[in-house]
Image (cartoon, rainbow, N blue to C red):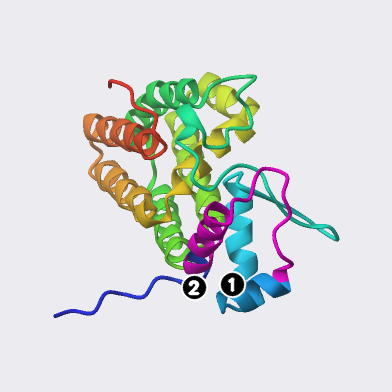
């Protein structure tokens, strides 16, 4: 029987902190124990703890305030974006609307990019996909989310549609937040990487329809991982 691969220490720490917040009844605004105490309690290094806290901060679950401490921002057991996950832009636009806009724009952009990408562009996308796998396996979800954003931005640039690129660039923080949100479930984080590989395969084949379909499937799945479901 094959042994189950050990999870990265930062991911283990991340899940342990979420469990601590839930089981000990921490509420938004409450301070967690000091980082030294947390590291000792969880049996992890300070470096691994910092990685876990960085990911939790990126997901909107805690706020790390230098010199003050770590504070809970939303309950660790909160429901998905449509019912409880932290979405800091709720007053401007909903997470559901953001994913639907991405579905429409980026699906088309991926199809156009399939016809326009150069060999160097494809090499850069391949390097991006490989780097994302490394970050995800190490439990560095914030870094993975930024690679996710770069991957999508490269395709928008390659599509040649400047209007779409301007829309995404003008709301970069909102779009980046939508790419962080699916990592709220670390146990499913590798699905993003697998979907990017599928998109890249279609791009490499110069399949316009295949790239558009793979991108739309990816965005719909990413939304579903946060609890946002829409027909596509």
Quadrant holding the N terminus: bottom left
Q: Secondary structure at mark 1?
A: helix
Spot occupied by residue 126 in the image (x, y as percentages of width and height): 38, 56
Depicted 229 relative to depicted 24: above or below: above
Residues 220 and 133: in front is 220
The answer to whether the residue labelled 2 contacts the one labelled 1, judged by CB atoms less than 8 Å apart, is yes
Residue 33 among magenta residues:
yes
Q: How many angstroms separate mark 2 from mark 1 (CA)?
A: 6 Å
Residue 182's disc is none
Which of marks 1 and 2 precedes in the sequence? 2
- In the image, what residue occupies the spot 25% across and 31% down? 213
Residue reaching furthest to the right? 67
Residue indicated by mark 2: 9
Q: Secondary structure at mark 2?
A: helix
Residue indicated by mark 1: 48
Q: Using the rendered view, name the quadrant where residue 47 is placed.
A: bottom right
Depicted 149 relative to depicted 197: above or below: above
Residues 221 and 206: in front is 221
Residue span colored magenta:
12-35
Residue 222 among magenta residues:
no
- In the image, what residue occupies the spot 41% across and 22% down? 100
Q: Is residue 138 left or right of residue 195?
A: right
Q: Is residue 89 left or right of residue 117?
A: right
Spot occupied by residue 44 in the image (x, y as percentages of width and height): 57, 77
Q: Using the rendered view, name the quadrant where residue 219 is placed.
A: top left
- In the image, what residue occupies the spot 65% across and 66% down? 50
- In the image, what residue occupies the spot 64% across and 74% down? 39
* Residue density around tag 1, few if under 14, some if 14–19, many if 20 or more, within 10 Å: many
Q: Is residue 76 left or right of residue 73?
A: left
* Residue density around tag 2, few if under 14, some if 14–19, many if 20 or more, within 10 Å: many
């Amino acid at each position: 029987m094959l042994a189950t691969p050990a999870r990265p220490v930062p991911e283990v720490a991340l899940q342990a902190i979420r469990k601590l917040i839930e089981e000990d009844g921490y509420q938004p605004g409450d301070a967690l124990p000091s980082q030294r105490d947390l590291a000792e309690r969880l049996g992890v290094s300070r470096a691994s703890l910092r990685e876990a806290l960085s990911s939790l901060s990126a997901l909107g679950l805690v706020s790390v305030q230098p010199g003050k401490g770590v504070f809970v921002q939303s309950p660790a057991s909160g429901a998905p974006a449509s019912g409880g996950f932290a979405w800091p832009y709720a007053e401007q636009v909903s997470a559901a609307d953001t994913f639907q806009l991405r579905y429409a724009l980026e699906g088309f952009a991926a199809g156009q990019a399939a016809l326009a990408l150069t060999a160097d562009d494809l090499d850069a996308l391949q390097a991006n996909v490989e780097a994302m796998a490394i970050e995800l396996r190490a439990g560095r979800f914030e870094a993975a989310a930024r690679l996710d954003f770069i991957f999508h931005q490269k395709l928008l640039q390659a599509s040649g549609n400047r209007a779409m690129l301007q829309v995404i660039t003008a709301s970069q923080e909102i779009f980046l937040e939508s790419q962080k949100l699916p990592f709220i479930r670390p146990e499913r984080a590798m699905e993003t990487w697998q979907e990017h590989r599928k998109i890249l395969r279609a791009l490499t084949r110069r399949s316009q329809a295949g790239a558009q379909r793979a991108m739309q499937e990816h965005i719909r799945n990413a939304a579903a991982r946060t609890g946002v479901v829409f027909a596509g």
